Image (cartoon, rainbow, N blue to C red):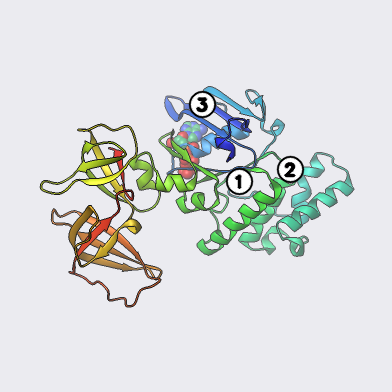
Amino acid sequence: FAPWEDPGQTPLIRIENVTKRFGDFTAIDDVSIDIYTREFFALLGPSGCGKTTLMRMLAGFETPSEGRITIDGKDMAGVPPNKRAVNMMFQSYALFPHLTVWDNIAFGLRRDRMDKDRVAARVEEMLKLTQLQKFAKRKPHQISGGQRQRVALARSLAKAPKLLLLDEPLGALDKKLREETQFELMEIQEKTGTTFVIVTHDQEEAMTVASRVAVMNHGKLVQVDTPERIYEAPKSVYVADFIGDVNLIEGLVASVGELAELTWAEGKAPLIGQSGASLKAGDEAVFAIRPEKIAISREEPEARNRVRGKIVDIGYLGNLSVYHVQLPDGSYMKCEVGNRSRVSRRDYTWEDEVWLSWTDTAGLVLPS
Ligand code: ATP
């Protein structure tokens, strides 16, 4: 049982029907989410969707206009940030430039008047956890960006919060370092057992690190699910399109059942896919199919889902090639082929007439 599927589990955080208004602008619109102990939870959405506002309400820097936030069974209404079992790590890291790495990590513990020996023990433990022992005596300007990020993390975890909020924690790092650091973050989260809630606009990052992802749009919660389900079973065109690449074909629902059929072009066989939501015959709908689930061939395939077209563009990405195929009606589809067992880069080329096909369960029929 994952904690969110176990009815016996009490969530660490309950966000219940929370709305946040700034004047007459609604930044968060009736959002409810349960987050469980030890989860690595991601709030994901485009700029301005309200994810930072939601996080700031968890931290206590903003108050909900409506609804309720409970942390560890306690209603947070009126509880100031420093009285919550929550710590927040800011994108800027906010390290003290004149203090050493050691003193930066010790800062909060000393302020709480923890005794000297315990402070030392805790700081050493945090240095070890974040592999910063060698840098303890340096100042922030004497270490790299990735190391500064780890100091900020060590400092945020020193007081053993139940919940750590991370606002775009890897935003300042370059792509390669970001990817490495994602795995370090996951390892540290697992070792400490702290619940992490991360805010990010980076789909890949959310999908890599999180146990569950909440996708937001215009202040609304669109879907909360595991990364696999967000990718494989998006409930809306918005989610399908926001995460990963997808081909979208508009049409009308012809029939629904275990599989749904979508009529999309005159004289063409309907497209068949899994039915993503409560649709009925005659509804306008969208067929969604991921490029890597499409096979390309010269011979007419047996699959019921098949379309013919012409290659108009090829993107070679090393590990895979992306073919842009123009269909007779002028629309385009994208198909990705892995290059692992490829014999030659010239398997298919521009202007080739090809078939694209996919299995009945590879695509989704979604409400438009
Ligand atoms: P980004 O990734 O760009 O930080 P976000 O999803 O985190 O975006 P928020 O910072 O939560 O978005 O902001 C959501 C909306 O609320 C934005 O339109 C923003 O302008 C507005 N907003 C946030 N704080 C305030 C405030 N104090 N007063 C008025 N409007 C605000």
Q: Which residue position holds label 2?
A: 160
Residue located 13% across and 56% down the image: 328
Using the rendered view, name the quadrant where residue 274 is placed: top left
Between disc 1 and disc 2, the foreground one is 2
Mark found first going from the N terminus, 1 or 2: 1
In primary-sequence order, the first of circles 2 and 3 is 3
Q: Quadrant of the image for the N terminus? A: top right
Question: What distance separates the C-alpha of mark 1 from that of mark 2?
Answer: 17 Å
Q: Nearer the viewer, mark 1 or mark 3?
A: 3
Residue 18 disc label: 3
* Image coords of residue 342 (percent x, y): 35, 74
Q: How far is disc 2 from disc 3 in space, using C-alphas? A: 27 Å
Compared across the picture, whether 293 is left or right of 299 comes to: right
Instruction: Name which residue type carries label 3.
Output: Val
Q: Amino acid at mark 1?
A: Phe
Disc nearer the start of the sequence (1/3): 3
The image quadrant that residue 150 belongs to is bottom right
Q: Where is the C terminus found, in terms of image quarters?
A: top left
User: Which numbered disc covers residue 233?
Assistant: none
Give the x, y percent position of residue 104: 74, 51
- Observer-nearest residue: 295 or 162? 295
Image location of residue 47, percent across then percent down: 44, 43
29, 60: nearer the viewer: 29
User: Mark 3: which secondary structure?
Assistant: strand
Residue occupying image coordinates x 55% and y 29%:
15
User: Which type of secondary structure does the marked residue at label 2 adopt?
Assistant: loop
